[in-house]
Image (cartoon, rainbow, N blue to C red):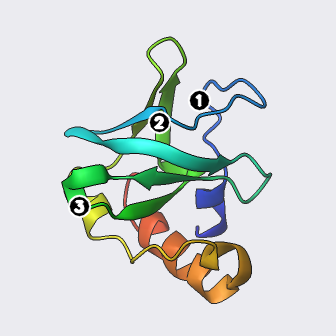
């Protein structure tokens, strides 16, 4: 379900309006970077993660459904993906996801097609 990937899981405890920028992002098999930008917009929630040297300074777009937990005390966001799944995601083009429905569908299709999403 492509559209569902843009909504947080009901099991993810969040504080409305909390700024996640700067939080570390942890995949199931290790750290992938830090949150550069995020949106809590209903039906269009996402994280933009700066991967730093891990993928040569690349940024990745993670739909909200990929988040499995947020640790406000340790400032960490946990995602239910492996580093390899994130590395193989469609290339992130800053702000294109806000303007191009086809691009948003491509990103959503990639993550929504995974069995655990």
The answer to whether residue 115 is visible is yes
Image-based side of 59 in relation to 64, left or right:
left
User: How many neighbours does mark 2 have within 10 angstroms: few (below 14), some (14-19), or many (20 or more)?
Assistant: some
Image-based side of 44 in relation to 24, left or right:
right
**Residue at screen point 73% across, 46% down:** 40
Label 3 and label 1: CA atoms lie apart by 30 Å
Kindly state the secondary structure of the residue where label 3 is placed: helix
Label 2 and label 1: CA atoms lie apart by 8 Å
Which circle, 2 or 3, is nearer the viewer?
A: 3
Figure quadrant of the N terminus: bottom right
Kindly give the residue lying farthest to the top in the view shown: 73
**Do tag 3 and tag 1 residues touch (Cβ < 8 Å)?**
no
The numbered disc on residue 11 is 1
Which circle, 2 or 1, is nearer the viewer?
A: 2
Q: Position of residue 9 (x, y in %)?
A: 60, 40
The earlier-in-sequence mark between 3 and 1 is 1
**Residue at screen point 62% across, 24% down:** 13
**Residue tagged 3:** 55
Image-based side of 66 in relation to 51, left or right:
right
Above or below, 104 against 13 in this view is below
**Do tag 2 and tag 3 residues touch (Cβ < 8 Å)?**
no
Which circle, 3 or 1, is nearer the viewer?
A: 3
**Do tag 2 and tag 1 residues touch (Cβ < 8 Å)?**
yes
Kindly state the secondary structure of the residue where label 2 is placed: strand
Q: Position of residue 42 (x, y in %)?
A: 80, 52
**Residue tagged 2:** 68
Label 2 and label 3: CA atoms lie apart by 22 Å
Kindly state the secondary structure of the residue where label 1 is placed: loop
User: How many neighbours does mark 1 have within 10 angstroms: few (below 14), some (14-19), or many (20 or more)?
Assistant: few
**Residue at screen point 57% across, 83% down:** 103
């Amino acid at each position: 379900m492509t559209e569902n990937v843009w909504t947080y899981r009901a099991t993810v405890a969040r504080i409305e309006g909390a700024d996640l920028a700067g939080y570390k992002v942890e995949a199931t098999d290790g750290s992938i970077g830090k949150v550069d930008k995020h949106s809590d917009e209903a039906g269009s929630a996402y994280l933009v993660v700066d991967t730093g040297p891990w993928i040569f300074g690349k940024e990745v777009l993670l739909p909200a459904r990929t988040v499995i937990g947020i640790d406000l005390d340790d400032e960490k966001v946990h995602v239910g993906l492996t580093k390899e799944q994130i590395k193989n995601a469609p290339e992130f083009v800053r702000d294109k996801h806000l303007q191009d429905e086809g691009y948003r569908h491509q990103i959503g299709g990639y993550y929504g097609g995974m069995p655990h999403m």
